[in-house]
Amino acid sequence: MADDAYHRTRFSPDPRRRVLWETLVACEFQPRIPAEATVLDLGAGYGEFINAVKARRRIAVDVWPGMAGHLAPGVEALITSVTCLDGVADQSVDYAFASNCFEHLSRAEFLTCLAELKRKLKPGATLEIVQPNFKYCAREYFDDYTHVSIYTHRSLCDLLVANDFKIQRCRPRFMPLTLQSPAPVHPWLIRLHLLSPFKLFGKQMLITALR
């Protein structure tokens, strides 16, 4: 997001976010990221995901210029739209990640982003997406005034397949929708949630696709 007002209201800094992503990366995502990988984080925001990742090369993409000031040493900042990845070499990315990104794009912009990713990802590379699942959060979905497009786990998987990605994993209920609640955020609670087969508060989906 280029609008600084958004980062002062709906997406303000929250120290709990760092705890969340450090735990999620360690428990869920890092095992699928090779040590020698080039990792691309789309719509990186405050950089909590990419900062926690261990990889040979880490690239954070966002239109918000303020992103660069939140990145850990060694993480490359690319201030650009996810629809224009000219700063990334073709077939150089092993793992791409997007959290709460594509619901902010129009359908045409998302298709452009996928076309860009098909050029930037190596054959067989991984794309992982975490974002709201409209099937389970319809009432709250447009509480975020920047949400543009609606996806469920089925529609997003179908769209990825239609654009030449292969679905490896689809979890309709992965994590709660937001951190905007009084509930504590502790690593052991996050781990317990990940291990539990019952995710009643899971309103975000996780989709893993292969190039």
Image (cartoon, rainbow, N blue to C red):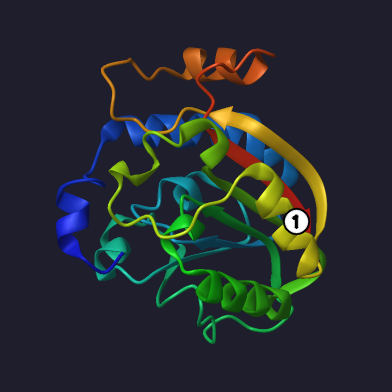
Other residues around mark 1 within 10 Å, as few (<14) / some (14–19) / many (≥20): some
Q: Quadrant of the N terminus?
A: bottom left
Residue drawn at (72%, 48%), measured in percent from left and top? 208
Q: Position of residue 36 (x, y in %)?
A: 72, 59
Residue 69, image x, y percentages: 26, 61
Q: Residue at x 39, y 33 (%)?
A: 139
Please state if 64 lies on the left or on the right of 81 as rendered. Answer: left
Where residue 14 appears, x then y in whole percent? 25, 36
SS at mark 1?
helix
Q: Is residue 117 above or below residue 16?
A: below
16 in relation to 37, above or below = above
Q: Amino acid at mark 1?
A: Asp
**Residue 168: image location, x then y, percent:** 82, 47
Q: Could you say which is closer to the camera, residue 32 or residue 101?
A: 101
Q: Residue furthest front?
A: 139
Nearer-the-camera pick, 105 or 35 = 105
Residue at 44% of width from left, 61% of height from top?
A: 43
* Residue 125 visible here: no
The quadrant where residue 186 appears: top left
Say which residue label 1 marks. 158
